[in-house]
Amino acid sequence: MDQNGLSRRSFLGKSLAASGVALVGGGLVAACGDSGSSSSSSSTTPSPTTTPVTNPDEAVARLLAGNKRFVDGHLDHPRRDDVQRSEQAEGQTPYAIILGCADSRVPPEIIFDEGLGDIFSVRVAGNTSPADIVLGSVEYGAAVLKCKVIMVLGHQECGAVKAAVDQVTKGKQVPGHIPGVVDPIVPAVQAVQATAANQLVDAATKENVRRTVALLHSSQPVLAPLVQGGQLKVVGGEYELHTGQVQLVQ
């Protein structure tokens, strides 16, 4: 976050209208448009301009278009120049929240071919959201920064999901504080436990994404009113490690 002094308590204590959440506190006024809405160019390599995102469907389409460039190897590497850096120093303008796994192989800005200030990235092993610190971060991106879409992004061969599968099927326990990222995934594993053993991790990964999407979609008091008002969409995706493609999870 680039704004200071906004605690979760003060954030949730502000007035939140059902049809359009507004937050004014500590002199903060943040609007989410598209960081490419103005031509961002450096003196050497101009960054491509992009049509501003005005609604959730456009936000999803832009994410998938960027991922296609990544998969095809035709990257724009947009808005990563000195001009964009200077513009974003005055205030971030992301259009999408990615609730993704902390896995080092799945960096959102790279796999969606985006630049500085385009994506509000919330990453935690297993891409779950029950913890207040995670949910609060997502709420901040939606209510304060006015992002148009939340994508819950799981991925193949997720270590947190594998640990949850081992816990359910073999009784294996993980050390230290790692249960904090494994335990929220256990219900997803249990729901698909009848799946063939060689497909269980992938089935649990998708089910975990679906459950997190459902949780965010109905989350009160911040996210659900935005979804109901058409200002926000929550979608799920799964990243394929070998191809680089993000497939939407229904």
Image (cartoon, helix red, strand yellow):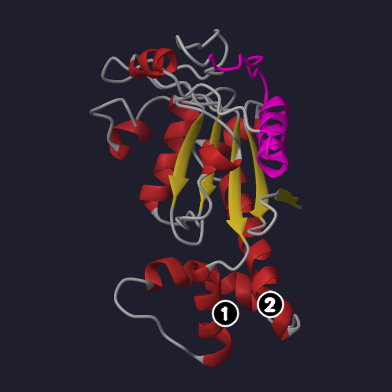
**In the image, residue 197 above or below residue 50:** below
x 70%, y 70%: residue? 203
Q: Residue pushed farthest left? A: 5
x 55%, y 66%: residue? 158
Residue 123, horizontal then vertical, whole percent: 44, 50
Q: Is residue 54 magenta?
A: yes
Q: For the magenta stretch, what is the residue range? A: 46-74
Q: Residue pushed farthest front? A: 44
Q: Nearer the viewer, residue 143 or 154?
A: 154
Quick one: label 1 or label 2, which is nearer the N terminus? Answer: 1
Quick check: marks 1 and 2 in contact, CB under 8 Å? yes
Give neighbour class at mark 2: few <14, some 14-19, many 20+ (Cα, 10 Å): some
x 38%, y 51%: residue? 132
Q: Is residue 70 left or right of residue 30?
A: right
Which amino acid lies under the numbered mark 2 shown in the image of this protein?
Leu
Q: Is residue 234 magenta?
A: no
Give neighbour class at mark 1: few <14, some 14-19, many 20+ (Cα, 10 Å): many
Which amino acid lies under the numbered mark 1 shown in the image of this protein?
Val
Q: Is residue 20 left or right of residue 130?
A: right
Residue 228, horizontal then vertical, whole percent: 66, 33
